[in-house]
Amino acid sequence: MKLKGQGDSCLVGAALSTGEAKIFSLSYHDVHSASQSNLSHKSISHDPHHSQLLSEIGSVSLPEEGLFLAIDWHTGIPNFEDDDGSPETSSNSHIFSISTQSSSIITFQLREGGEIAERSRFSDTHSLHGENLPAWTVFSCPFNTNLLVSGGDDCVCRLWDLRQAGREVAALRRKHEAGVTSGQFHPLEEHMFATGSYDEYLRLWDRRKLSAPLSEMHTG
C-alpha cells in the first residue's frame, strides 16, 4: 500500500493478492458533520473529533497475473504524453506501477471518473532457467517519472526506462544472495536508492556506478 499526496488531498494505492489494484481517496472530516451526513465510509482515525475516511475510486483486475505484489506512485516530473499527444499536467498525472507474481511490471494511469488505463508493460522481468519468478517489488524515481526499479526472486535488481519498452537499462546481478524484496529511492539525492533482500542485508546504491554498493548493513 502506498500513499500519494498530503493533507486533505491524498490517494492510497493497494496491491492485492487477488490480482487487483485498488485506488482510494483519503479525506479528512469533522466527525459531527460526517455523522449528520450519514457517511458510510470506513474511518481509520482514533481522533474523537476528526476522522480520516477511505473511499474507493477505481480498481483494475488482472487475475492471470496471479498476486499483485507491490505498488508505487510515480511522483517525479510528469512527462508522459496523453492519448492526444499532448503532455500531461500534474493535475491528471496519477501514474502508478505494480509488480506481479507472474513477473510483470505494469504501469497504469488513474483518469477522471476512476477509469484506470494501462500505459506500459514489461513482461518476464525476473526469471531463472526459463521460469518466471515473482517480481517482489517495484519503485519509481522521484526525479524522473520514467525510471523504475524492480527486484525479484532471481536475486536481481533491474532498472527500467518507460521510454524503452521491454528493455532494461541496467541490472544488479550477483549483488544479492537472495530475492530482492523491497527498495526506495532517496528523496533528495537523485541517483541514490536502497534495496532490501531475503539475505538480510540493506544496501545503498548509486545508479551511475552499480559495480558495488555504496554501503551495506546486515539487519538479521
Image (spheres, rainbow, N blue to C red):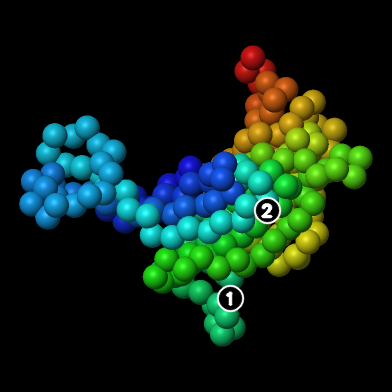
The residue under the point 81% across, 44% down is 132
Image spot of residue 143 (x, y percent): 57, 55
The residue type indicated by label 2 comes to Glu
- Judged left or right of residue 91, residue 187 is right
Residue 139 visible, this angle:
no
Residue positioned 85% across, 43% down in the render:
131
Question: Residue lying farthest right?
Answer: 129
CA–CA distance between discs 1 and 2? Answer: 28 Å
Instruction: Name the image quarter holding the C terminus.
Output: top right
Q: Nearer the viewer, residue 96 or 173?
A: 96
Q: Secondary structure at mark 1?
A: loop
Q: Nearer the viewer, residue 14 or 10?
A: 14
| Residue that extends furthest to the top in the rendered view of this protein | 220
Q: Look at the image and tell me whether residue 73 can be seen.
A: yes
- Residue 135 is situated, as x and y percent measured from the top left of the image, at 70, 43
| Whole-percent x, y for residue 31 in the image | 13, 44
19 vs 215, left or right, is left
Q: Is residue 211 above or below residue 6?
A: above
Query: Number of callouts in the render?
Result: 2
Identify the residue position indicated by label 2 in the image.
64
The residue tagged 1 is 81
Disc 2 element: helix
What residue is at 47 percent from the left and 68 percent from the top?
Answer: 115
Label drawn at residue 166: none
**What's the amino acid at mark 1?**
Glu
Nearer-the-camera pick, 172 or 121: 121
Q: Residue at x 8, y 52 (%)?
A: 36
